[in-house]
Amino acid sequence: MKKSLIIRMWKFTFPYIDIRLTRLVGLTFGLMIAKLWAPILYLDWYWYLIIALLAGIKPIMTFWKQV
């Protein structure tokens, strides 16, 4: 019997190129948001730092658990 889809998805690991392409998608999506909604560019620099640090917690923890 096959395991459920959620369990199979949870254990899936992406190749390095897929991770890099996902980062590129995120970057271009962010640039698109900035182009379409200019007020986001007027945030102070530390808001971008806080968002980046919060978004990076999970990948960094996953990396250190596997190393």
Image (cartoon, rainbow, N blue to C red):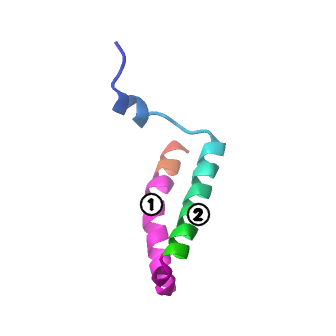
Q: Residue furthest right?
A: 17
Q: Earlier in the sequence, mark 1 or mark 2?
A: 2
> In the rendered structure, which amino acid carries the disc numbered 1?
Ile
Q: Is residue 38 magenta?
A: yes
Spot occupied by residue 58 in the image (x, y as percentages of width and height): 44, 55
At x 37%, y 17%, the residue is: 2
> In the rendered structure, which amino acid carries the disc numbered 2?
Leu
Instruction: Report, in whole angstroms, how far the alpha carbon at label 1 lies from the one at label 2.
Output: 18 Å
Spot occupied by residue 45 in the image (x, y as percentages of width and height): 51, 84
> Which is the main secondary structure of the residues drawn in magenta?
helix
Q: Residue furthest front?
A: 36
Q: Is residue 36 magenta?
A: no
Up the image or down, 15 lies above or below 52; here it is above
Magenta stretch in the rendered image: 37-61
Q: Nearer the viewer, mark 1 or mark 2?
A: 2
At x 52%, y 43%, the residue is: 66
Left or right, 50 with reference to 26: left
Spot occupied by residue 60 in the image (x, y as percentages of width and height): 50, 56
Q: Please, what secondary structure does the residue beneath circle 2 have?
A: helix
Q: Residues within 10 Å of mark 1 (few under 14, many from 20)?
A: few
Up the image or down, 39 lies above or below 32; here it is below
Name the residue tied to disc 1: 57
Q: Please, what secondary structure does the residue beneath circle 1 have?
A: helix
Decide: marks 1, 2 in contact (CB < 8 A)? no
Name the residue tied to disc 2: 27
At x 48%, y 34%, the residue is: 12
- Which image quarter holds the C terminus? top right
Q: Residues within 10 Å of mark 2 (few under 14, many from 20)?
A: few
At x 47%, y 80%, the residue is: 40
- Which image quarter holds the N terminus? top left
Spot occupied by residue 3 in the image (x, y as percentages of width and height): 35, 21
